Amino acid sequence: MTQPPPPGYPPQQPPAGQQPDNYLVWSILATLFCCLPLGIVAIVKSTQVSGLCAQGQYGEAQAAADSAKKFVKWSVIAGVAVYVVVIIINVIAAMTATQNTAMLAAMF
């Protein structure tokens, strides 16, 4: 574990010159529009990136960024899968309702 620099010394810069992308915007969008539980985990991981970078823990910051990206992807996949299933159920229900209506009309 890397110790932060003593007070009075400037913090070290990340090896690549900048902190990794934290995917916070994508995490919020995935939470709102796709899958709430996975999106919340993505937001938590995203918010850890800046703090870890500020502490000089660049490897951990990159790992948190990668984890946030993974949870955003899984949130989107889960959200799309749920939407597809709901659409299929609605189509089947509409077809069944149409058939029932046609059968009722034929009976009278």
Image (cartoon, rainbow, N blue to C red):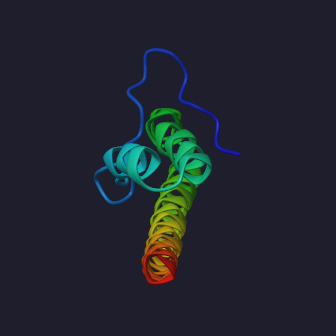
Residue 15 appears in the figure: yes
Q: For the view shown, which residue lies furthest in the top direction?
A: 8
Q: For the view shown, which residue lies furthest in the left direction?
A: 17
* Residue at image coords 47%, 68%: 73
Residue 11 in the figure: left or right of residue 56: left
Q: For the view shown, which residue lies furthest in the right direction?
A: 1
Residue toward you, 11 or 61: 61
Residue 22 appears in the figure: no
Where is residue 20? Give x, y as percent: 37, 54
* Residue at image coords 41%, 44%: 32
Residue toward you, 73 or 61: 73
Examine the rendered structure and indicate whether residue 48 appears above or below residue 30.
above
Examine the rendered structure and indicate whether residue 48 appears above or below residue 60.
above
Res 28 → quadrant: top left
Q: For the view shown, which residue lies furthest in the front direction?
A: 108
Where is residue 83? Give x, y as percent: 45, 67
Examine the rendered structure and indicate whether residue 14 appears above or below residue 16.
above
Residue toward you, 80 or 37: 80
Examine the rendered structure and indicate whether residue 50 appears above or below residue 105.
above
How many marks the image carries: the answer is 0
Where is residue 23? Give x, y as percent: 37, 52
* Residue at image coords 55%, 46%: 36
Residue 51 in the figure: left or right of residue 14: right
Where is residue 52? Give x, y as percent: 53, 39
